[in-house]
Image: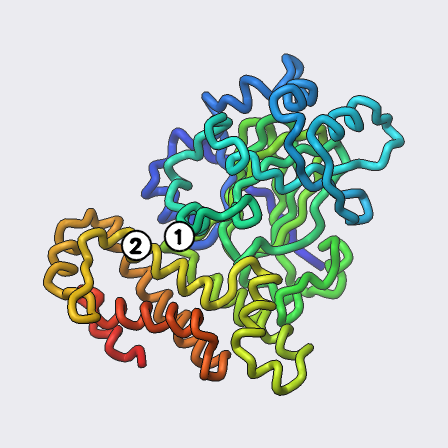
Amino acid sequence: MASRERLARVPLASLTVEEFRDRYMIPNEPVLLTGATHGWRAVAEWVTPRGAPDISRLAALFGASSASVVEEGGARRTMRLSEYADWWRARSAATPPLYLKDWHLPALFPSYGAYTPPPHLAEDWLNEHWRQAAATEAGDHRFVYVGPAGSRTPLHADVLFSYSWSANVCGSKRWILVPASQRGLVSDRATAPLATDVHLLEQAAAGLRLVEVEQQAGELLFVPSGWYHQVENTTDVISINHNWLNAYNAHWSIVRLAETLVEIKSRLAADDASDGALCELLLEQRCGLGLCGLCELLLGVLRRRLPVAVRRSGRLEKKRMRETEESMPHRTSLECDRAAETLRETIATIEREYESPWESTMQQIVDEARLLLCSYPGSHQGQNVS
């Protein structure tokens, strides 16, 4: 039988950025933060006086925008916000729920300013990467969800084993989370959940620890890397969600990609399984980024945080990079160190999983990463990257 525990609430205003990092991000533990949506335009404009979603207001603001909606059985289709609002107003208690999910509002309406994430959550390498790549909404991991009572998201882990946060603009949700240390009890070796509902696994998964969360309006849940979870909307809800990577969890993405690659290779013929370009493409389709994509992301993180690094004779100039490191705030220096460490691990995984010769773009990304690491300030480890 599984054991169950409730997650305590912590006022966001009582928690410094450093305390949040040390108590929750680094230990990879969840927390429910209260008072997280004060001053958000979304709260002022999307909620009725009774605290319910103002679907008519959303349709007036964004009616021509399209989003994915999910039926009770899991089938997806695309609807305009105006169409979804019509469905919402016409529904009855017997109407099967339609859940509007993964609506890329921040990317589609960047000037609207629906919300500002707390500074505790600001360091976001994943969405920074997509912004730098001038990505379409498909590469963005900032979402709005709108769902009626009874709509749900089945058991899953988030993209790339990223951190996620979810803030309720209005309404309430019930979450069940499974610690990353116990993910083997609820998923296969390729990270796929063993069931859509964790309750179906309780009898078989001896020692399973379940963390239950009742999230109310104005509260923000931090979901750590590798924690499987399922969610039910217990009332009509609007929520805002981000997936993100930073210095404290980017290494989890290597784990997710490597484990997913096991499953991909198992379905390919021997010749195809050794084709690095094909495996990378399939990994991108499954996870949004492949191993070389993660390598490129981390390379960009380092380049943007070492702004005076220059090329000389085909190498980064060590003296200038050392001067940059000395002038960087400690936090930025730490981020660079962790990004460099994770980049080394990513290159090692690429070399282990993909037989060379590689496709030219893949080779270029890896070569540029090796070059930077060999000259990274204060680092001798880069010399071990062949």
Whether tag 2 and tag 1 are in contact, CB under 8 A, the answer is: yes
Callout 1: SS: loop
Residue at (26% x, 73% y) in the render: 382
Determine whether 349 is above or below 289 in the image.
below
Q: Is residue 381 left or right of residue 24?
A: left
| Amino acid at pointer 1 | Asn
Name the quarter where the N terminus is drawn. bottom right
Residue 35 visible? The answer is: no
Quadrant of the rendered image containing residue 181: bottom right
- Where does residue 236 sit, x and y in percent of width and height? 71, 28
Q: Is residue 142 left or right of residue 316?
A: right
Residue projecting furthest to the right? 94
Instruction: Out of 338 and 371, give the one closest to the viewer.
Output: 371
Q: For the residue marked with disc 2, what is the amino acid?
A: Glu
Instruction: Name the residue at 37% across, 45% down.
Output: 123
Residue 359 in view of the camera: yes
Residue furthest to the bottom in view is 270
Describe the element under mark 2 as helix, strand or loop.
Answer: helix
Q: Which residue is mark 2?
A: 335
Q: In the image, is 159 to the left or to the right of 250?
A: right
Q: Quadrant of the image for the C terminus?
A: bottom left
Residue 180 at x, y percent in the picture: 55, 59
Q: Position of residue 221 (x, y in %)?
A: 53, 40
Q: Which residue is mark 1?
A: 246
Crowd band around label 1 with a 10 angstrom C-alpha radius: few (<14), some (14–19), many (20+): many
Q: Position of residue 108 (x, y in %)?
A: 54, 35
Left or right side of 356 for 153: right
Q: Residue 371 sits in which quadrant?
A: bottom left
Question: Going 45% across and 47% down the picture, which residue do you hit?
Answer: 134
Q: Image point 45% across, 83% down: which residue? A: 357
